[in-house]
Amino acid sequence: MNYSYLPAQKLKDVLHEKLSGIRTGRINSSILDSVVVEAYGSKMHFIELSTITIPEPAQLLITPFDKSVLPAMEKAIVNSNLGVNPVNDGAGLRLVFPPITEENRKKRVKEIATILEEVKIMLRSNRQDILKKFKREKEEGQMTEDDLRRNETQLQSEVDSLNEELEAITKQKEEELMKV
């Protein structure tokens, strides 16, 4: 039996998604992914309501497809924890992000560590579920003792490898954050 037991790509995607909300020196439109706008009677994301451009490294320009949602977009940004006040020029919103201080960089590094730990907890939970499945299969006679040991060893190898990948992803984000 040589197949992967873990949802590795899903865990990496979760980590990337959570890390994309942490701002580094250069602004990326993905910082708005977690902000939801009340528009047209439902909750929508900025990407569904507007075009987002980056005119300067520390600035986002949000141009809505429909100008009537501009106040709702502005309210969503003000209520978010982005740490920026939108400038409404009637045609769109301009977000000018202040430079990140050393103190904020260190705080964000701690956030990154917390996010990594959350994903590792998900990984350990998946590992435990898979181990229970293996033991149940052995008890039901679907797997021999040797198969159980071999599968446990392979699973642990996958967990170790995935842990290394997750740590590399977060280390890259930390390095990006600490660049001045």
Image (cartoon, rainbow, N blue to C red):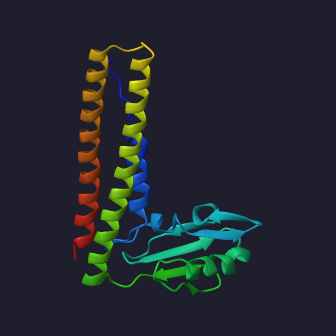
Image spot of residue 48 (x, y percent): 63, 61
- Left or right relative to 28: residue 42: right
Q: Which quadrant would residue 157 be assigned to in this image?
A: top left
Towards the viewer: 108 or 143: 143
Q: Which quadrant would residue 21 be assigned to in this image?
A: bottom left
Image spot of residue 135 (x, y percent): 39, 25
Query: In the image, what residue occupies the spot 43% across and 75% down?
Result: 55
Q: Residue furthest right?
A: 41
Query: In the image, what residue occupies the spot 29% across and 62% down?
Result: 173
Image quarter where the N terminus lies is top left
In this orientation, does residue 32 appear?
yes
Say if 63 sits above or below 117 in the image: below
Towards the viewer: 85 or 6: 6
Question: How many discs appear?
Answer: 0
Towards the viewer: 68 or 115: 115
Q: Which quadrant would residue 153 be assigned to in this image?
A: top left
Q: Residue furthest front?
A: 139
Image spot of residue 176 (x, y percent): 26, 66
- Left or right relative to 137: residue 165: left
Say if 123 sits above or below 30 in the image: above
In this orientation, does residue 7 appear?
no
Towards the viewer: 113 or 13: 113
Query: In the image, what residue occupies the spot 69% across and 70% down?
Result: 38
Image spot of residue 138 (x, y percent): 39, 18
Query: In the image, what residue occupies the spot 61% across and 76% down?
Result: 76
Image quarter where the C terminus lies is bottom left
